[in-house]
Image (cartoon, helix red, strand yellow):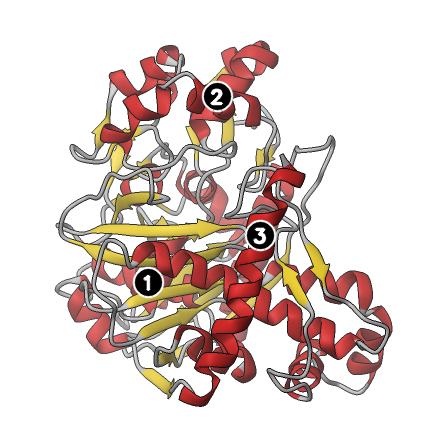
């Protein structure tokens, strides 16, 4: 029998589920993707139909195997990544105890505000090393305990998104370290659940609902007969622990030491680097465990990135999308051309990319500033692109309080597919930006994890050396430094001036 030689990575993002099959050299054999619907049953509630999400995973797994044209027995292992935080509650029978909750959910905002006001945050920070926000399981569990006690009592397991999908593949309930360490449920120094943490949040009785902890590269079960029947995977295929999507993207861009920054410009603006010691500071968004032992991932993040462009295109470019699709083109290629048609000095319009969250305050909202009658849709698009990069710059400048300025940054996420956007990142940050050859970095990072789990690679470093390649490096234009510094200064001034309006 031919030895298994392919790796399957599955990536459950906020709005899209993807699967990719890779060989040990990092060659992408096939990919598949399907959009998943977000539901907003009430203001501040962002949910997913759990069965629909599993169906999306079933679909992309089956499709990617067919597109690869391989027998499923040639897949050596599977691993799943997904968005962090939010929450998936499962009862003792393995059925959802509630709809899946997305990382954009804000129903528990009042609990977070209370914890910051009453000193809980100051007491918890030395243990958790991260900010508290409404979509974290600690806040959501407190909310469910207070407002939906029946669902809370019915819950047997509290999963992260990717852990739920792994559970459906294997039937084995597990949590995984990188994902769990970003939830404020753990002591980030000891890398264990800590009863003191849950007690401070008022959810001590949730300890028994937290699944057993595993590492990213642990084998956490094998594809069950039922999962094999619907996905087309071979029954018994090993399934690794998987990892937090910010780890998966960092890994797939080749981040294995403290040298470089990693920028992820997707639904969230995620900006991160590796540290050999955990950092606990009220000025840093999050410290979490990295998949490589001995490193912690220092992150500055907010929901202020490329999803703002998706909104603009959906709400304001319906006609252009139809024309582009009729011509066999992507509407996003058209967006790039429109942005490139406007010089950086060609407009005073600014965009604050706070449609889904912000790094400027809990109640900040998105807006255009400085519009005139002569502005066109192209000017607005450039403002959106620039506003997203300015939000990333805000995070990067916070990170640089804790480390030296890097020689380069690696980029991942939807913005990495746009040459004009990558050049803008280089110019605004005045850093060389390196783009790796794989586009579906979440799935590839999960595949790397799967390969390490089954011994296809000696280590994550070995896997990255064999699978990751830089496709191109985009150097900053020094002539644009002053232009973007002035624009970023105006952007920051408006953000500061509007804080009293947002409250």
Nearer to us of marks 3 and 1 is 3
* Mark 3 residue element: helix
Q: Nearer the viewer, residue 447 or 376?
A: 376
**Disc number lying in front (3 or 2):** 3
Q: Quadrant of the N terminus?
A: bottom left
Distance between mark 3 and mark 1 Cα atoms: 29 Å
* Circle on res. 141: 2
Q: Which mark is residue 187?
A: none
Which residue is located at x 52 percent, y 53 percent?
A: 13
Judging by the rendered image, the residue that carries numbered circle 1 is 250
Q: Secondary structure at mark 2?
A: helix
Identify the secondary structure beneath mark 1: helix
Camera sees residue 75: no
**What's the residue at 41%, 76% (across, down)?**
438
Q: Residue at x 78, y 82 (%)?
A: 324
282 horizontally vs 102: left or right: left
Residue at image position (51%, 65%) is 489
Q: Is residue 4 above or below residue 433?
A: above
Contact? badges 3 and 2 (CB < 8 Å) = no
Q: Position of residue 494 (x, y in %)?
A: 60, 55
Q: Quadrant of residue 173?
A: top left
Give the Cα distance between marks 3 and 2: 32 Å
């Amino acid at each position: 029998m031919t030895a298994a030689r392919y790796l399957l990575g599955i990536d459950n993002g906020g709005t899209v589920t993807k699967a990719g099959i890779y060989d040990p050299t990092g060659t992408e054999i096939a990919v598949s993707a399907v959009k998943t619907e977000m539901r907003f049953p009430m203001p501040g509630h962002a949910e997913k139909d759990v069965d629909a999400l599993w169906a999306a995973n079933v679909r992309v797994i089956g499709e990617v195997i067919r597109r690869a044209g391989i027998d499923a027995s040639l897949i050596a292992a599977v691993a799943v990544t997904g968005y962090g935080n939010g929450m998936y509650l499962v009862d003792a029978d393995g059925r959802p105890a509630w709809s899946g909750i997305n990382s954009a959910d804000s129903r528990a905002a009042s609990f977070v505000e209370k914890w910051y006001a009453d000193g809980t945050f100051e007491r918890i920070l030395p243990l958790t090393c991260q900010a508290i926000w409404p979509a974290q399981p600690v806040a959501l569990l407190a909310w469910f305990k207070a407002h939906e006690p029946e669902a809370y009592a019915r819950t047997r397991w509290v999963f992260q998104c990717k852990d739920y999908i792994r559970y459906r593949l294997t039937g084995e309930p597990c949590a995984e370290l990188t994902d769990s360490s970003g939830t404020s449920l753990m002591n980030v120094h000891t890398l264990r659940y800590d009863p003191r943490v849950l007690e401070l949040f008022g959810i001590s009785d949730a300890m028994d609902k937290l699944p057993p902890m595993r590492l990213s590269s642990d084998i956490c079960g094998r594809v069950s007969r039922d999962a094999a029947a619907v996905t087309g995977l071979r029954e018994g295929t090993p399934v690794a622990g998987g990892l937090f999507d910010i780890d998966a993207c960092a890994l797939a861009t080749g981040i294995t030491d403290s040298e470089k920054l990693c920028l992820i410009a997707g639904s969230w603006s995620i900006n991160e680097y590796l540290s050999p010691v955990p950092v606990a500071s009220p000025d840093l968004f999050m410290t979490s465990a990295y998949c490589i032992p001995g490193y912690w991932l220092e992150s500055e993040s907010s929901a202020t990135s490329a999803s703002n462009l998706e909104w603009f295109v959906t709400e304001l470019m319906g006609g252009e999308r139809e024309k582009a699709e009729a011509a066999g083109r992507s509407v996003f290629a058209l967006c790039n051309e429109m942005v490139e048609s406007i010089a950086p000095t060609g407009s005073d319009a600014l965009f604050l990319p706070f449609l889904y969250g912000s790094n400027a305050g809990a109640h900040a909202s998105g807006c255009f500033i400085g519009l005139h009658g002569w502005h066109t849709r192209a000017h607005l698009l450039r403002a959106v692109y620039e506003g997203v990069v300015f939000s990333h710059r805000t995070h990067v400048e916070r990170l640089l309080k804790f480390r030296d300025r890097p020689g380069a940054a690696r980029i991942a996420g939807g913005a990495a597919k746009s040459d004009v956007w990558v050049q803008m990142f280089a110019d605004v940050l005045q850093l060389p930006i390196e783009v790796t050859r794989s586009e579906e970095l979440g799935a590839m990072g999960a595949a790397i994890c799967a390969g390490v789990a089954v011994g296809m690679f000696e280590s994550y470093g070995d896997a990255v050396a064999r699978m990751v390649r830089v496709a191109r490096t985009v150097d900053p234009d020094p002539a644009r430094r002053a232009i973007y510094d002035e624009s970023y200064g105006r952007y920051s001034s408006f953000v500061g001036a509007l804080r009293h309006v947002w409250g």
